[in-house]
Amino acid sequence: MIVYCEECGYKNIIDENRIEGRQPQIPCQKCGELLRFYGLKAKALQKPSSQKSKKVPIYCLVLKYGKVVVLVSEKNTHVEIGRQKSNDIQVVNDRVSRTHAVIEYRNGKYYLTDQSSNGTYLLMERGKGVVLRNKEVLLTAKGVIGLGYKVDFTSPDAIHVWFKKTR
């Protein structure tokens, strides 16, 4: 599990077996401050299901920003985008928050959540552009994301999003 330190922004990789109780006391591997487990605690404390036949997703989500390509899938369920170096996709711009937006894979679907001051712009194929302000939206088609500003499919600063067949 990946947990970002709120103090220094370091990307900590935590073994889920180390998480005990309702308020785990696990320090950051860089600065030593105790990590906070927002929303992940309940997921981490659940016992694994005994179902052996799990459906493998047909698609994964591809994010491309410049030369950086990140896949969001059942194996990589949480991708952070923002100005901080520790983000999975770093976008250096004054309008971009330290952790501006998150893309998550949950229950077979992909969600974009804005966590910023300036909003996140999303334009999907054959659709209208929308500005998210501390809201979540389901990603359903190829599109582009702008952090803090409007983009289109030809914008050099756009984060391109599309679905890729995995099987």
Image (cartoon, rainbow, N blue to C red):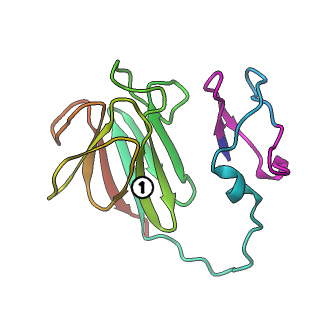
Q: Is residue 126 above or below residue 122?
A: below
Residue 101 percent coordinates (x, y): 43, 39
> Is residue 139 found inside the magenta-colored segment of the image?
no
Q: Main SS of the magenta segment? A: loop
Residue at numbered disc 1: 111
Residue 41 percent coordinates (x, y): 71, 52
Residue occupying image coordinates x 82% and y 52%:
17
Residue 87 percent coordinates (x, y): 51, 32
Q: Secondary structure at mark 1?
A: strand
Residue occupying image coordinates x 74% and y 20%:
31
Q: Quadrant of the C terminus?
A: bottom left
Residue 71 percent coordinates (x, y): 45, 50
- Give the extent of the magenta segment: 3-25
Residue occupying image coordinates x 80% and y 50%:
22
Residue occupying image coordinates x 73% and y 22%:
30
Q: Is residue 107 above or below residue 75?
A: below
Residue type for callout 1: Tyr
Q: Is residue 128 left or right of residue 148?
A: left
> Is residue 4 found inside the magenta-colored segment of the image?
yes
